[in-house]
Amino acid sequence: MRFAPIVLLCFAPACATVHPAPSSATRQELLEVERAFSRASQAHGAPAAFADNLAVEAVELAGSGPPIHGRDAIVASLQAKPGSTSSLTWEPDDAAVAEAGDLGYTWGHYTLTTQAAGKPPSTEQGKYLTIWRRDRSSQRWQAVVDIGN
């Protein structure tokens, strides 16, 4: 029995979970997911794009207001007020993916244009950070935290 600990130590590395470093292809995949998200916002409106890309438990941290919890509440907050229109687009500047390949973030710049009835359009520009998680069952990236300023 004096050799049992030595034998166990020899096999310990083989039992450890090893996650290969994510490839640049995984990073590029996440950037393309972000770009497709923005294109969907432009084509179908922000509420529809967010409904399709947010996790159910997502959190929105925008401006100086309180956090918005849950996909449905976030989508509702993006609905244009009656008599007004809005357009939200963005472009990621960079992304990173965790070693396990199941968590990542993107960041970049956004443009929000709103127009109330009878008023000239108003444009706001800012920065954003989105934290993404790959869904285990579908392998699809879903935004879990969206931060904009």
Image (spheres, rainbow, N blue to C red):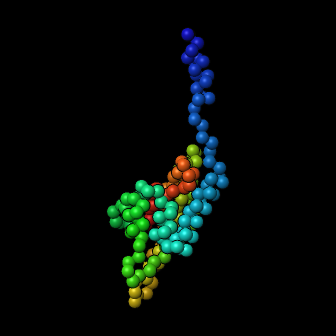
Q: Tell me: 105 left or right of 56.
A: right
Q: Tell me: 56 left or right of 3.
A: left
**Rendering coords of residue 86 (x, y %):** 45, 77
**Residue 97 visible from this viewpoint:** no
Which corner quadrant of the image does residue 56 belong to?
bottom left
**Rendering coords of residue 36 (x, y %):** 58, 66
Count of number-bearing discs: 0
Residue at the image position 38 percent from the left and 64 percent from the top: 73
* Residue 29 versus residue 76 in the image, above or below: above
Quadrant for the C terminus in the image:
bottom left
Residue at the image position 47 percent from the left and 60 percent from the top: 54
Looking at the image, the residue that sits furthest to the top is 1
**Residue 12 visible from this viewpoint:** yes
* Residue 112 versus residue 134 in the image, above or below: below
Which corner quadrant of the image does residue 69 belong to?
bottom left
Which of these two is toward me, 135 or 35? 135
Q: Tell me: 115 left or right of 43.
A: left
**Rendering coords of residue 78 (x, y %):** 42, 70
Which of these two is toward me, 55 or 105? 55
* Residue 46 versus residue 141 in the image, above or below: below
Looking at the image, the residue that sits furthest to the bottom is 118
Residue at the image position 45 percent from the left and 60 percent from the top: 146
Which corner quadrant of the image does residue 3 belong to?
top right
Quadrant for the N terminus in the image:
top right
Residue at the image position 41 percent from the left and 82 percent from the top: 84
Looking at the image, the residue that sits furthest to the front is 137
**Rendering coords of residue 103 (x, y %):** 53, 50
